Image (tube, grey):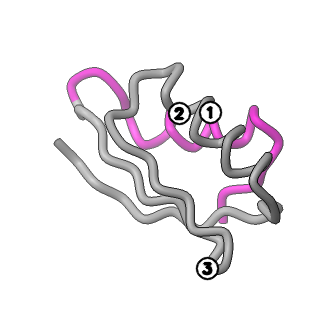
């Protein structure tokens, strides 16, 4: 299991939080914790199934920018 803390721009409400968590769950991220105040997403995933690039891409496809 790998864990990363990503800085994500553009999240401001519960809908944003739900959209990011849903997008990550769809690709198989084990856990995703969104912190709206800090503008971060803490993710844990199996590196044999996903790459950090795929995680970032899923967040960007949901409409948010990964810094």
**Horizontal relation, residue 26 to residue 43: left or right:** right
Q: Secondary structure at mark 3?
A: loop
- Magenta residues (range): 48-67
Give me the C-alpha separation between circle 3 and circle 2. Answer: 19 Å
**Cβ–Cβ under 8 Å for marks 2 and 1:** yes
Q: Give the foreground label among 3 and 1.
A: 3
In the rendered image, the vertical position of residue 26 relative to residue 40, given as above or below: above
Q: Which residue is mark 3?
A: 38
Number of residue marks: 3
Percent across and percent down for residue 48 are: 21, 25
Disc 1 residue crowd, few under 14, some 14–19, many 20+, Cα 10 Å: many
Q: Which residue is mark 2?
A: 24
- For the N terminus, the image quarter is top left
**Horizontal relation, residue 8 to residue 63: left or right:** left
Percent across and percent down for residue 36 are: 67, 69
The residue under the point 67% across, 42% down is 18
Disc 3 residue crowd, few under 14, some 14–19, many 20+, Cα 10 Å: few
Dot label at residue 58: 1
The residue under the point 66% across, 57% down is 66
The numbered mark, 3 or 2, whose residue comes first in the sequence reads: 2
Give me the C-alpha separation between circle 3 and circle 1. Answer: 20 Å
In the rendered image, the vertical position of residue 40 relative to residue 55, given as above or below: below
């Amino acid at each position: 299991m790998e864990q990363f803390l990503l800085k994500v721009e553009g999240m401001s409400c519960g809908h944003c939080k739900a959209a990011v968590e849903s997008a990550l769950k769809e690709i198989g991220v084990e856990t995703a914790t969104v912190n709206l105040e800090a503008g971060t997403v803490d993710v844990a995933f199996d590196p044999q199934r996903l790459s950090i690039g795929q995680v970032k891409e899923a967040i960007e496809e949901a409409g948010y920018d990964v810094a």
